[in-house]
Image (cartoon, rainbow, N blue to C red):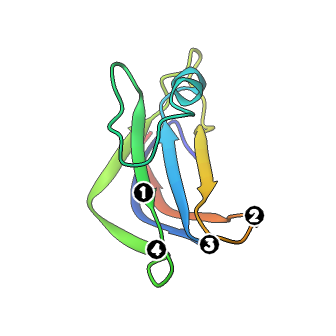
Amino acid sequence: MAVGWRVYRVGTDWPARIRLYATLAQQAADLLRAPGTDPAGDHGLLLEYTTKDGALGALLSPVVDGASFEDPVSSDVPVTIQNRDLEAGTVRLSLVYVRTE
């Protein structure tokens, strides 16, 4: 994606829970956090959004700014996507964003 970015829109093709993080370590530490539970400590969660039938995408307001805090920095963004549909399937994520760095 980019080292720094600003997300304006998020969407999926199936109902899903999407989470973007600042580092891979923070993503791994937050892997088992249940939906509806706030993250604790230095969690690195930059964006969490849940889509559902009839609302598979949304414009974000306010927009979400994020950046890599890996050492060294990376344009790869750690993302966790959980299918929230009753039917198993691969979820495709789409983000409308601009690069800020």
Q: Are marks 2 and 1 in contact (CB under 8 Å)?
A: no
Query: What residue does disc 4 label?
Result: 57
Q: Distance between the residues labelled 2 and 1?
A: 17 Å
Q: In the image, is 33 to the left or to the right of 63?
A: right
Tell me the amino acid under the disc marked 1: Tyr
Q: Which of marks 3 and 4 is nearer the N terminus?
A: 3
Query: What residue does disc 2 label?
Result: 90
Q: Which of marks 1 and 3 is nearer the N terminus?
A: 3
Q: Provide the secondary structure element on which disc 4 rests.
A: strand
Q: Residue at x 55, y 42 (%)?
A: 2
* Farthest right residue in view: 89
Badge nearest the viewer, 3 or 4: 3
Quadrant in the rendering for residue 87: bottom right
Quadrant in the rendering for residue 94: bottom right
Query: What residue does disc 3 label?
Result: 14
Q: Distance between the residues labelled 4 and 2?
A: 16 Å
Q: Residue at x 76, y 67 (%)?
A: 89
Q: Are marks 3 and 4 in contact (CB under 8 Å)?
A: no
Q: Provide the secondary structure element on which disc 2 rests.
A: loop
Q: In the image, is 24 to the left or to the right of 43?
A: right
| Circle 1 crowding by C-alpha within 10 Å: few under 14, some 14–19, many from 20 | some
Query: What residue does disc 1 label?
Result: 49
Q: Which of marks 4 and 1 is nearer the N terminus?
A: 1
Q: Distance between the residues labelled 1 and 3?
A: 13 Å
Q: Distance between the residues labelled 3 and 2?
A: 8 Å
Q: Where is residue 37 in the image (x, y as percent from the top left)?
A: 35, 40
Tell me the amino acid under the disc marked 2: Thr
